Image (tube, coloured by chain):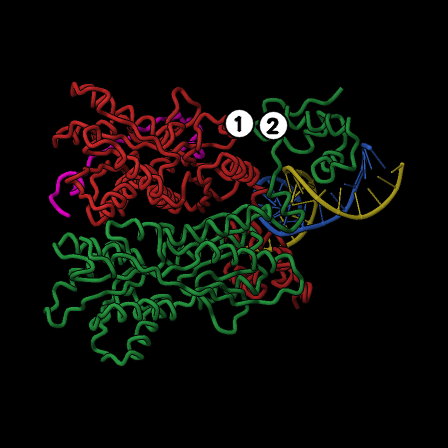
Chain colours: A green, B red, C yellow, D blue
Amino acid sequence: MAITPAAGSSRSASVKDVAATAGVSLGTVSNVLNRPERVSRTTRERVERAMADLGFVRNESARSLRTGSTHSLAYVMLDAGNPFFTDVARGIELAAETAGLSLFLCNSDGRSAREGAHLAHLQQQRVQGILITPVDPDDPQIDQLIERGTPVVIVDRTRAGSSFCSVAVDDVLGGRLAVEHLIDVGHKRVAYVGGPESIGQVRDRGEGARQAWAEAGLPPEDLVTLSCEAPTVACGRAAGERLVGLPARRRPTAAFCANDLLALGLLQQTISSGRTVPGDLAIVGYDDIEFAAAAAVPLTSVRQPRHDLGRRAAELLLDEVGEPGHQHEQVVFTPELVARASTLGRLS
Amino acid sequence: MAITPAAGSSRSASVKDVAATAGVSLGTVSNVLNRPERVSRTTRERVERAMADLGFVRNESARSLRTGSTHSLAYVMLDAGNPFFTDVARGIELAAETAGLSLFLCNSDGRSAREGAHLAHLQQQRVQGILITPVDPDDPQIDQLIERGTPVVIVDRTRAGSSFCSVAVDDVLGGRLAVEHLIDVGHKRVAYVGGPESIGQVRDRGEGARQAWAEAGLPPEDLVTLSCEAPTVACGRAAGERLVGLPARRRPTAAFCANDLLALGLLQQTISSGRTVPGDLAIVGYDDIEFAAAAAVPLTSVRQPRHDLGRRAAELLLDEVGEPGHQHEQVVFTPELVARASTLGRLS
DNA sequence: TTGTAGGCGTTATCAT
DNA sequence: ATGATAACGCCTACAA
């Protein structure tokens, strides 16, 4: 008769317990788990029965200690509250799911310290690989991760000649598209509402804006930059107030915002202060998050293939993990302008 | 002289390697890691030096295999794309951070299968505990988790007489607040735009709406329910179209939506079809996400203390993990109506 | 203060 | 087809 496992034990059942109650050896249980074809049907059923009875749950720690690899991926997001990143995450998740891996989401919330803590912990966990939209892509901790053997893919940023893969969107082009569009519809004074210059995306989009402006032969001083503390709805509102404060003759007739959060904040401030969009102020956002199209004055925005961004990033990571001869790759997607009422319409 | 660790080895350095290069025993290295006070300053520095040189990274799998517990918590979210849940997550994160634990976010995306896969994996990982906003709070897998020793706290749902803690908001009251407000401002025909009845929150909010309606002595048939497939922006738009389709004399003058995503979709469809808010249709949302206040017609909404919800949930979980005499608790927060232009204003 | 030994649960390599 | 056994890396008594 089978030996009863430690009764009343709060410890969860191990393969050893399963082996004991099934009356087989430990190796057999392991075979049932990992190579079921090597074990006869009857014993296998007996073992499976024992596992169910005991409520056996595989211990992933022991497993990965032994095999040297886990079944997890992680994505360290820059801002989980920004729908752009959750959409990217969805793309990653899809790829992870099809590869049979679990995806952990970590939120750095734009803070280097949190990002660092997450990275350290993920490294200790020996996750198979890390996807990250970094606070600062030049952070040495990222190189250190790679040196120590954790593959990393940078999402939504690039770094020249780097030792990792990255997937990004051409932000300079995106900035150009936005401003070219505003010029096309007749604007001669435009504001670029950016987050802090420390954010690469913000810099690049501003650079694209300036390029388009210069190429149209317009005077540089008529493209004014409003710099915000963070690319958030609240800052967009604040930017709106600063805009109203300008003397009418110097006040821009249009604004290009570094992301949709800023644009939505600006939109709301504009409307609620009694002005109209695009009549008094045309607005272009960036990212084309769902809420942009859903704004009462639907927002013109620069769309990024955020789902593909995530999926491709995950694929690169999985390739790096799986293929011995992996070559690092810098993928750059092309953004696209989606024109809506906030620059075109006569609404509101 | 210290023994050199396996050169060129792709395997990462272990405590053993550190001990070897530092010329101390394995136990001393462990002490440096776990009780630095027990080791003399000079040896400690030597060991730390060796760790730095070797790029030593603690192996969390081995650690938790040995100690029987991890340093991670997880929150399984119902919809990572809904800012309500990301705000809840932020509250959880705060509590986890102060407790020195890492938080993994998992997204079930409303799919039972994904939820189940995440739970299984987290259980195998032996996370310290799981917070979850479940697709279905009666899912037996949740009870099974608890039986097998993983503490669980349900977020944003309750279950009567249950074997776990939960933190929720009184959704029936929330529904009442919304509809009482609409009655107050003079509406006599109101639509309740809900997601599928399978979602408890949707049921409860609808129930509250009906209670308020009945108590005001209004005829039940004048509170019409529009049921949507999912509580999303797209479905809100679709609901708007259905509303327009109704004959004018039966058409509601106000809508209460089960969440802000629906409300924003409805708002947008209403405005873009040339009608006004609240003139032609007053709208109340639920959750008071940031985008609700930021809508061009700021949305009246039922606010939930989503940050506190998360924080409290995490605290309960940590208590359950840490305190032996833990008592399960069902915390219920009170929602609050935030009235804005979508029911009050004369804008737009 | 430092070193030694045993074991956590699993997998994989051998024998049988 | 099944069983015994030795790691994986770490922690913690306990011994020196």
Give the chain letter at badge 2.
A
Disc 1 marks which amino acid? Answer: Gln
Q: Which residues are magenta?
A: B319-348
Q: Is residue A313 left or right of residue B78?
A: right
Tally the numbered discs.
Answer: 2
* Residue at 43%, 56% in the rendered image: A306
Disc 2 marks which amino acid? Answer: Gly
Residue A149 pos. (x, y %):
59, 61
* Residue at 51%, 50% in the rendered image: B34
In the picture, the disc for residue A55 is 2
Q: Is residue B284 above or below residue A132?
A: above
- According to the image, label 1 marks what residue? B144
Residue A338 pos. (x, y %):
34, 59
Q: Are marks 1 and 2 on the same chain?
A: no
Q: Quadrant of residue B177?
A: top left
Residue B97 pos. (x, y %):
39, 47
* Residue at 44%, 58% in the rendered image: A305
